[in-house]
Image: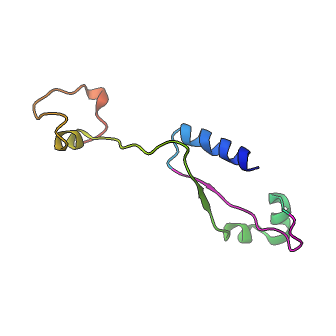
Amino acid sequence: MQDAQQAFASEVYRRGAHAVYSTPLPLEENGEKTGLDDFLAGYGVEAFLNLDLEEIASPYPPFKVWSLADLRAAGLVEVGVEVHPGLLLGE
């Protein structure tokens, strides 16, 4: 399950998600795992909505999206230098 969950999260991150969350279901009283359908049947939707979320870490390194103002402040682009409009993500 963990491998499938991580593979799914990796694909969602690859497609541009900023965060991916999981809702781990509690074990039954006897220590057995429970499926979502059994959990909902036994405890209801409200109990599911009250469970804690856990963020699944991205497998990709964080990166910074630079605006033109950021580039100028860092001295990477001089004022007056023409920058291709397709490279600008915001001022």
Quarter of the picture holding the C terminus: top left
Q: Image quarter for residue 66?
A: top left
The secondary structure that most of the magenta stretch takes on is: loop
Residue 8 versus residue 85 in the image, above or below: below
Residue at the farthest left position: 80
* x and y, in percent, of residue 41 in the image: 85, 66
> Residue 62: x and y, percent?
44, 45
The residue at the point 31 percent across, 37 percent down is 89
Q: Quick one: 48 or 27, which is closer to the camera?
A: 27
Given residues 51 and 72, the one toward you in this image is 72
Q: Is residue 51 above or below residue 74?
A: below
Q: Is residue 8 above or below residue 78?
A: below
Residue at (73% x, 71% y) in the render = 47
Q: Residue at x 68, y 67 (%)?
A: 49
Seen from the viewer's position, the closer of residues 39 and 5 is 5
Q: Residue at x 62, y 45 (%)?
A: 9
Q: Is residue 67 left or right of residue 82?
A: right
| Magenta stretch holds residue 23 | yes
Q: Quadrant of residue 53?
A: bottom right
Q: What residue span does the magenta drawing correspond to?
A: 19-32
| Image coordinates for residue 56, horizontal then vertical, percent | 60, 53
Question: Looking at the image, which residue sits at the far right?
Answer: 30
